[in-house]
Amino acid sequence: MRIDTISPAEGARTSQKRLGRGIGSGLGKTSGKGHKGQWARSGGGVRPGFEGGQMPLARRIPKRGFHNKWGKDYVIVNISALDALPAGTVVDYDYVLENGLAKEVKNNAGLKVLGGGEIKVALNVKAAKFSAAAKAAIEAAGGTAEVIL
């Protein structure tokens, strides 16, 4: 076998359609576009989603919701998830994610601790935000709630 004898597999490459090359080709005269009309013209056709002038579906359906582009998404953990940890543990953003205590969110602004459940062990919790109930519960158990940015 020589390099000049190598060719693609049978059917791997198809030849280009040659339009407007005489009646015998079957694609002469109008080049397969039929007679006149929007589809026969240069640049003809309609954009995706166009419904012939009828009010399009995207505009018939009501708008809903709001996306605050300055809003912050936090990785959220409840104090009930922290109750099983050994006393004296330093709980921060990295610790929570490594131990699977909370799910990571895109574009997050840090860790937020909420007061769901109760906590009986003294922990050193470092987070971007605390709910009032969470802070009170952590401090009542003998731990510290430190706000970090």
Image: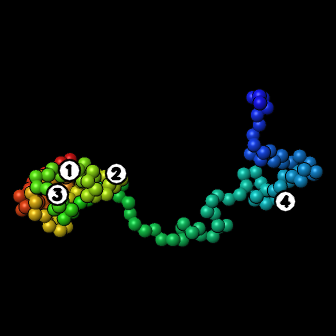
Q: Helix, strand or loop at disc 3?
A: loop
Q: Residue under label 3, please give it.
A: 85
Residue in the image at 27% along x and 50% along y: 98
Q: Please tell me which residue is depicted at 84% across the width and 59% down the height of the picture.
A: 35
Q: Residues within 10 Å of mark 4 (few under 14, many from 20)?
A: few
Q: Nearer the viewer, residue 35 or 98?
A: 98
Q: Residue at the spot x=20%, y=50% of the render?
A: 92
Residue 128 image position (x, y, % from top left): 21, 52
Which residue is the site of mark 1?
92
Compute the Cα span from label 4 to label 1: 71 Å
Residue annotated with mark 2: 107
Q: Does residue 132 appear anywhere in the picture?
A: no
Q: Secondary structure at mark 2?
A: loop
Q: Which residue matches tag 4?
A: 35
Q: Earlier in the sequence, mark 2 or mark 4?
A: 4
- Badge 3 density bin: few <14, some 14–19, many ≥20, Cα 10 Å: some
Q: Left of 121 or right of it: where is 42?
A: right
